[in-house]
Structures are given as structure tokens and as C-alpha cells.
Amino acid sequence: MTKRNQALLAAIALFGTCTAPLKADLMDSTNSQHVSFPDARLTVNGLAWFDEDKPTLRRLPVRLKESFRPPVWSLAQQPSGGRIRFKTDSTKVAIRAQNPDTSGMHHMTTIGQSGFDIYVNGEYMGSAWPDKTGNIVKEWAVGNKRALHEITIYLPLYKGVTINEIVLESNAKIEPPASFALSKPVVYYGSSITQGGCASNPGMSCQAQLSRWLNLDFINLGFSGNGLGQPAVADAVSGIDAACFVLDYWGNPTPEVFKETLPKFVETLRKNHSKTPIIVTGPYFFPYEALTAKNEGALAQKRKTAEEFVANQRRAGDKFISYVDGREMLSREQAFGLVDGVHCNSLGFYFCAKGLEPHLRKALKLGKEHASR
């Protein structure tokens, strides 16, 4: 064998070693700590009614089930925006879960729909996804030395999931996660775009990105195809003690329904939250919009409705409501951030987050220390 071939074989062997999948040895080792879910040491964020409905991971409370339309209740079983947070000095973290619906949409990854992301000290470290039977068993390396790490596990955007346990090294510490910049969450209400369609990963929705940049908690109440501003949902949303409400539901209703429901939705929120900031967004850019007459298109009508409604509210004395033109979030020049001409991919959600950030920071009176990375 020539020296050249020997070097090539050595390089292949080294590459194979570097890319070999990590074995889930924590799961089977006797030297491990199995933390059944839920556990008081594991903080669950993003699911407003988790404490009353646990261990179920859902986005609306079961006590109000009969007040919601069946499609909304079904979508509420998808825990978009849910996160498990804690600190640990374990150098490995593993998860065991089930995601029984392994079907997939053509325009979204399995990880985004059905999987988990793990972030360590605010940085992405890996993902997990179900096998053909719906089982999820995954171990991540999270550090090379025993030091406390901030762990955030993002839950699936579009499929219901059951978590059995989190597994750590046997003698690892578990401590509460760091506090957010504000004690109350930002609550987002909207359509499939708000829910996270079609981010490649659970941690790459617009809301998740903003949360990391500004150190804010958030609750995602986007309901795919069903963000219609209905009274039952408005009542539920108004029951949340929020730092800010973002109404981003322009994508689903007709211009007529949007014009009818937006004032009623805000009126419902104001009954319980007279001075809580409310941000109303208008449509971002759709490619087909370029082919529609400016003053005749549905998107233009919805922009006009949102902008005029907010202006009227402010003239009437509500100084805590503001309007954001969605084209500041995703412009014509950024349309390549759409996966199907309608929904954002992860890059598109980055654009949306960058566009919304200054408005959110202003509404919440966050200083320069909360500027994005």
C-alpha cells in the first residue's frame, strides 16, 4: 500500500471517529440520574396553564375546552413555545419522550414539527426527533467539565408530545434556571406563522429568537389556520398576566373578519389589562402581493384596518397600543425567507424577529443592555 493510500485511510478513519453518533449510554447506565417528568426541579415555561393541567403539555386549559372550536383545541395540544429549563453541572443531558404522530408536512422538517432543540448557556447544541415508532431517545453532550450550565429544551412546534424523563449523570446538581429580564411573559396570538410554521427547528421561531436576544419569557398562542380573533380565545388570552400582548393574526381572517374582530379582541384585553402594552402587526410581504393592485388586495386592506384602528385607539387615549407594519419584519427584498411563498423558514423568522425587536423593546421600555446580539 502506498503512503498516499495509507494517509487517505487514516483520514477516513479519523473522520468516522469524529462524526460517529453519540451513544445514549446515560439511559442504560446505572451511573445516571433519572428525573421523571414533571419534576419541581424542572421549570416549564411558555405553557400558561401547565400547573393546572400537568403533566399534559398543551397551550390552552382543559377547563375551557368546550368554549373553543374543535380545530383550535386540537392545535392547542401542540406545545409550540413550550420550554423546559434548569441548571445542571452534568456534562451530558438525555431525554426520553414519545411523539405518536410521525406524519410530516411537505414544507417543514421533522425536527421543527416533532422534535426538540437543546440550548446550553444560550447557544444551540443539538436536536432530537422521533423514530418511526414515535419514540424519542437522545443524549447530548453539554460540557466538557463539571460546571453549572443553563439548559433550555424547546418543545415541538406542530406535534403533541409526552415526556417521560430527563436523564443526567448520577451525582449532577439540578438548580433553578436564571431569571428573565421581566417577571411576566410576552404573549403572542396569531396564525400558523405565529405558531412557528415553517421553522426548521423549535428554537428558531420568531418568538424563540426574540426571547433569547432580550432574555424574555414568552407564550405562543398561534393556531395554524385558525387565528380568527374569536371571543373564546380572546377571553383565555386576557386571563394571562402578560408583560405585552402581540396580536399577529392577520394571516387567517378575511379583511372583513379582521376588521370586525380586532376591536373586540383589544376591548377584551383592555378589560383586564388597561395599561399593558399591545402591539398589533400588519401583514408582511407575500410574493403574490406584487401582482395585486395596491388598493384592492386583501393584504392592503388588513394593513389599513390595523393601522387605522391603532391610530384611533391612540387618539382616544390608549397610549399603550402600537402598530407595526409587517413589511418591517419581512420585506419584498427578504421574500427568499419564505419556504412556500407564505410561511417563513428559519431565516425568514430571523428577519421577522429583527424587525419586531425595536418595537417590542420600546413597548417594554427595555434599555440598551437588552439589544440583540
Image: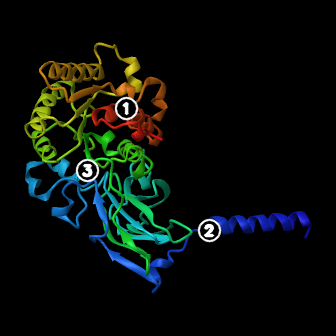
Q: Is residue 359 visible?
A: yes
- Circle 2 sits in a helix, a strand or a loop, which is it? loop
At label 1, the amino acid type is Pro
Q: Residue at the location (47% across, 84% down)?
A: 29
Location of residue 51 in the rendering, given as x and y in whole percent from the top left corner:
19, 62
Residue situated in front as seen by the camera: 262 or 1: 262
Mark identifier at residue 358: 1
Image-quadrant location for residue 279: top left
Q: Dot 2 corresponds to which residue?
A: 20
- Left or right, 80 with respect to 305, comes to right
At label 3, the amino acid type is Ser
Callout 2 crowding tier (Cα within 10 Å): few <14, some 14–19, many ≥20: few
Callout 3 crowding tier (Cα within 10 Å): few <14, some 14–19, many ≥20: few
- Circle 3 sits in a helix, a strand or a loop, which is it? loop
Residue situated in front as seen by the camera: 170 or 327: 170
Q: Farthest right residue?
A: 2
At label 2, the amino acid type is Ala
Q: Dot 3 corresponds to which residue?
A: 183
- Left or right, 205 with respect to 282, comes to right
Q: Earlier in the sequence, mark 2 or mark 3?
A: 2
